[in-house]
Amino acid sequence: MSEILSLFSNVGNITAQQVVMWVIGGIMIYLGIKKQMEPTLLVPMGFGAILVNLPMSAAVTQKAGELIEAGPLDILFDAGIANELFLLLLFIGIGAMIDFTPLLANPILMLFGAAAQFGIFMTLSLATLFGFSLQDAASVGIIGAADGPTSIFVANYFDSKYLGAIIVAAYSYMALVPIIQPPVIRLLTSKKERTIHMEYSPKSVSRMAKILFPIMITVIAGIVAPKSAPLVGFLMFGNLIRECGVLDSLSDTAQHTMANLVTLILGLTVASRMRAEEFLNVQTLLILLLGLVAFIFDTAGGVIFAKIINLFRKKKINPMIGACGISAFPMSGRVVTQMALKEDPTNILIMQATGVNVSGQIASVIAGGLILGLVPKL
Amino acid sequence: MVFLESLKVMGLGMVGIFAVTIILVAVMKLLTKLFPAKTDK
């Protein structure tokens, strides 16, 4: 009888905090499956959150006195996330997925991508007012990149103990772009501004320009912001294999098989940083709040920049496209396109919105690289 | 103190990102000028 009872002795090790984490994990799985919110990340992370918060879970490293038993999730974390390897591999896949043609056809749209990174830096400053160190504040601010892998890369570079909360915030708000952006855009623009039509003259881009583009971007970003070299370089390498026309098989593998494999492991592995004792604290709530602030200021930055540009232009820009400068692709472009159609069913902004949206992907990576260069590592 | 330092990062960061972006815009314009698509000719 006592032997049977000993089988269930671990039940006594369950803590209230662990149960809270199971609920959080369950909510993430629910949002991923039922609401289709970033399911590729939220489902593995939600499951991982439950897995690592089982009492004495051998999935993560456990210490019993002098004895240390390494858990597979911590081993995976050290092997692929602590050294940024998984993220860089994922960047190749992302680069192979992006078509930069709308941006090359209208390069000036790139400026909106830059303006929409304002939320990152604004949130960085705000976070220091809440007692975060400059390094942790930078890790929190980068949620505003609206780019999961960049957020993980920067937070991990600064060895932030808030990595779990930062990832949850980054991916949750990316999925919530259709809810976060419209009210901010409406608040900052008039009906008249939202109905501005923008001419679009379809311009084709040569294959040579598309091939040279990733190489040039890598060289320039690498020289100006050397810390961004791995981020930009791997992203642009992915794009080069897409555009060169002779590596279709590699491009296809990078876009699908490799990106899926890395995402699969990434979601489960980052959950190793969602242990109750590290995750359930006031800082996590603050990070979730600051992440929202970052997305709001990103949107505002892009819209206000477009309004400023309009002061000097005869042909007005629809300021809503400024909001697409965040990296959340294609959600942000889609949101603005739909808003424009709702205001005026004849106003089609899809190409301009897409161009700004892809520029946000480059700008967010460069912003991440700049932060790595500007904020000293402890 | 940390806040003041963060303001410096914000200023330099935004200036930096616009500086890099302006260079990239110029490069993209140059690329499309030097290598126009055949249909544009």
Image (cartoon, coloured by chain):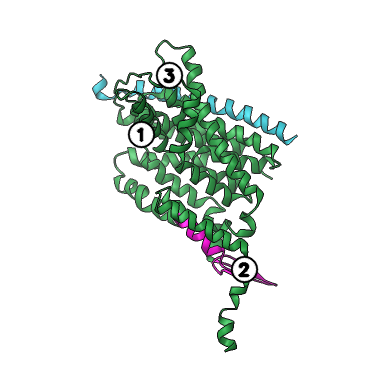
Chain colours: A green, B cyan
Residue A224 image offset from top left, x and y in percent: 55, 31
Magenta span covers which residues? A43-71
Chain of the residue displaying label 3:
A
Extreme-right residue of the structure: B1
Along the horizontal axis of the image, is A348 left or right of A359? left
The residue singled out by tag 2 in the image is A62
The residue singled out by tag 1 in the image is A211
Label 3 vs label 1, nearer the camera: 3
Mark nearer the N terminus (3 vs 2) = 2
Label 1 vs label 2, nearer the camera: 2
Element at label 2: strand
Residue A320 image offset from top left, x and y in percent: 43, 25
The residue singled out by tag 3 in the image is A193
Which residue is at 62% across, 74% downward? A12
Along the horizontal axis of the image, is A331 left or right of A163? left
Element at label 3: helix
